[in-house]
Amino acid sequence: MITKEMLRALRFDIDAALVAVAEKHGLKSLTTGSATFGPGHFTMKLDGLAEGGKSREAARYESAGFLGLPPLGSTFRSGGHTYTTVGLNTTGSKVLCDREDGKTYLYPVDTCKALVAVQNPTQSKGKK
């Protein structure tokens, strides 16, 4: 029987195996995406990104000029960690930020703008 817990474990193993596949084919990344399942079957999407390509979240971030966000790739420190802006969520209310250990966190737009503006004024657009 297919369960949510089994799919989580399977996703971890598939993502680990996809690293070699992405490298072999010159992709920046190749990861599992959304999944649906029933008692006896499942479907899982693959998300790939070519070298030099931008994720949907990064493209969304760069097209949201009206929010006055700092440039994509801006950095800030919070809670003793360094974060880099990498995208914008689908509602445009939170910024996806990669931590130096590879984990991704969501920060409210205003919080992210304020942290970058205070810590790295040269990266900030200076808009509120």
Image: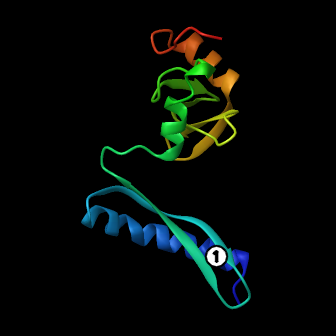
Q: Relative to 32, is 34 on the left or the right?
A: right
User: Residue 105 in the image: x percent, y percent?
Assistant: 62, 41
Which quadrant holds the C terminus?
Answer: top right
Q: Which of 6 and 108 is in front in this view?
A: 108
Q: How is the image coloured?
A: rainbow
Q: Nearer the viewer, residue 60 or 1?
A: 60
At 46% from the left and 46% from the top, the residue drawn is 55
Q: In which quarter of the image is residue 106?
A: top right
Disc 1 element: helix
Q: In which quarter of the image is residue 48?
A: bottom left
Q: Is residue 99 visible?
A: no
Amino acid carrying mark 1 in the image: Leu
Q: Relative to 28, is 12 on the left or the right?
A: right
87 to 51, vertically: above or below: above
Q: Which of 121 and 126 is in front in this view?
A: 126
Q: Quadrant of residue 3?
A: bottom right
Q: Can residue 19 be seen in this view?
A: yes
At 45% from the left and 10% from the top, the residue drawn is 122
Q: Please give the residue where the numbered disc 1 appears in the rendered image.
A: 7
Q: How many numbered tags mark residues here?
A: 1
At 40% from the left and 68% from the top, the residue drawn is 18
56 to 48, vertically: above or below: above
